[in-house]
Image (cartoon, grey):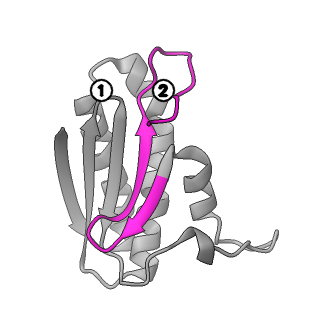
Amino acid sequence: MQRSSVSRPAENAQISELRSAGADLLKACLPDPRVYDAVESDAKLLITEVATNALVHGEARVLTLTLATSGRAMRFSITGQTSDLPARQRRHYPQPTAESGRGLFLVDSLATAWGADLHLGVWFVLTIPDAVGEPPTLAS
């Protein structure tokens, strides 16, 4: 298993920096540019959503993004939340006109799996596609 981390101050202006740093971590573990291109946009969107949730609902001064890879699975985790971590059974459905509240729905839709715990923070898994042009498969 390979693991890399990057930290940024828990500030609004740092979310884009954390997303860019996450893309750099991803590129380092996916040397084939076609495979990187196949997962880059989902990874960056989910990093942004999870980091923003950590910033809005957390109390940490620093957000840490960790990317751990094993086989075809890539687990991204962001620490910096409080003990009030998101859970599937506690999710609410935002009103159609609401300007926020859809981040975890995106995570649920795009990630192979996701969850939250006090040690890992909020994490999500993306699967590296077998070949470019094929959709990712579920990790076992």
Task: Write the residue at 74% across / 73% down.
Answer: 94
Residue shown at the point (20%, 55%) measured from the top left: 6
Q: Position of residue 58 (x, y in %)?
A: 38, 81
**Vertical relation: 2 (above or below) 59:** above
User: Which disc number belongs to residue 107?
Assistant: none
Badge 2 marks a residue whose secondary structure is: helix
Q: Position of residue 32 (x, y in %)?
A: 32, 17
Residue type (three-letter) at the residue carrying disc 2: Ala
The image quadrant of residue 60 is bottom left
**Extent of the magenta region:** 114-140
Disc 1 designates what residue?
30
- Residue at point 58%, 68% (across, down): 88
Q: Earlier in the sequence, mark 2 or mark 1?
A: 1
Mark 2 neighbour density, 10 Å: few (under 14) some (14–19) many (20 or more): some
Q: Quadrant of residue 106?
A: bottom right
- In the displayed structure, 24 sits above or below 53; it is above
- Quarter of the figure that contains the C terminus: top left
- Residue 108 falls left or right of residue 4: right
Q: Position of residue 119 (x, y in %)?
A: 26, 69
For this view, does 3 lie left or right of residue 16?
left
Q: Nearer the viewer, residue 115 or 44?
A: 115
Q: Secondary structure at mark 1?
A: loop
**Pointers 2 and 1 in contact (C-beta within 8 Å):** no
Q: Which residue is mark 2?
A: 38
Horizontal side of residue 75 vs 29, given as left or right: right
Q: Residue at x 34, y 47 (%)?
A: 75
For badge 1, the amino acid type reads Leu
Residue 112: in magenta span: no
